[in-house]
Image (tube, helix red, strand yellow):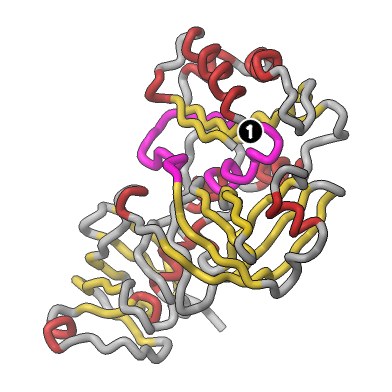
Amino acid sequence: MSNQIFNVQLNKNKQNFECPEHNSILEGGLRHGLAMRYECSNGTCGVCKARLINGDIKKIKHHDYALSADELDNQEFLMCCHAPGSELELEVDLIGDVRSIPVQEIQIKIKNIHFVSDDMAIVSVRTPRSKTLQFMAGQDVELSFKGVVSRYPIASCPCHGMELEFHIRNIKANKFSQLVFSKQIKDKSKLDLTGPKGVFVLKETSTKPMVFIAWDGGFAPIRSLVEHAFSLEMSNPMTFYWAYPASDPAPYFDNHAQSWHAVMDDYHYQTVACEFDRSNENDCHKVAKQIYDSLDHDMVNQSEVYISAPAEVLIYLGEFLLENGLNESQLIASPI
């Protein structure tokens, strides 16, 4: 069965994307990295309203949300319940920046916990269909279970909608992680999520090369940013440096970072084995220098540089980079 693909033009935002005739317009836009407003994706909330300017749409599912007579006269419709029937021109109100996203409170359910090592868990969760988390790549949230709260970056791309991923390291001082590794938090457990928070987000309109630097579990928000850049089909050259303890054979998700070569030709990946452990007893100045010495400095100075690392490492590494000629506006950093 053929599935025709139509171009959808957003006139207000000067953006466009391709959407198959059997997919909802909302699904097509999210898959292409557009920050569309929505909550439920099933026709209940009405948040994903758009206005049809040119073209034909077709209804592919029922919606309980009732559009007013004025909205119908204005050619408004719900993107989650309609697919393109031709080339389209729409008026859509996209999210402008992190400040326009409200903090949300959602009860989520653990879908799966995969222990990739004795002290790292990949936790996948699902939001309810009626309340999907609206966030931007690189942001983080607070997770709560029976009164125990901890803050984690989202490791997944906003294009995946209801499924979120978190990378949780087993840290004795962190009660939440202890609940995960003692398996008190397990498959089907319900958690409370509050967020999103943070401003560690992609400069989507920049044409500069992109350099990403992660310390260990700082890979989580970096992964969200990189895969969001892929969904936007950004052509900026991309380099990823991943610092990890020299005592480990490789970073915990090394194969995943290598797999990005298949998605993007102009992608370079380098691991940086450093003398650090995961306690708070590290010589952060020494580690920052080890990371700094591994970088291609000429390339870095021409790039937008995204760093996810402990605060002390960030401070020292930032100082090294700025002293070497990086413009402060090109440095985007998030402590972990």
Residue pointed to by mark 1: 214
Is 36 rendered above or below residue 304? below
Residue at 31% in and 70% down: 87
| Residue 269 visible | no
17 w.r.t. 83: above or below: above
Relative image position of residue 311 (x, y in whole percent): 57, 28
Q: Could you say which is closer to the camera, residue 199 or residue 255?
A: 199
* Amino acid type at mark 1: Ala
User: Is there any visible trace of residue 36 in the rendered image?
Assistant: yes
Q: Position of residue 22 (x, y in %)?
A: 47, 80
The image quarter containing residue 255 is top right
* Residue stretch in magenta: 198-225
Residue 213, located in which quarter of the rendered image?
top right
Task: Pick the quarter of the image with the C terminus.
Answer: top right
How many residues crowd around disc 1 within 10 Å: few (fewer than 14), some, or many (20 or more)? many
Q: Residue at x 54, y 20 (%)?
A: 315
Q: In this rendering, would 298 be left or right of 291?
A: left
- Between 263 and 27, the residue placed more toward the observer is 27
Q: Answer with left or right where residue 305 lies relative to residue 120.
A: left
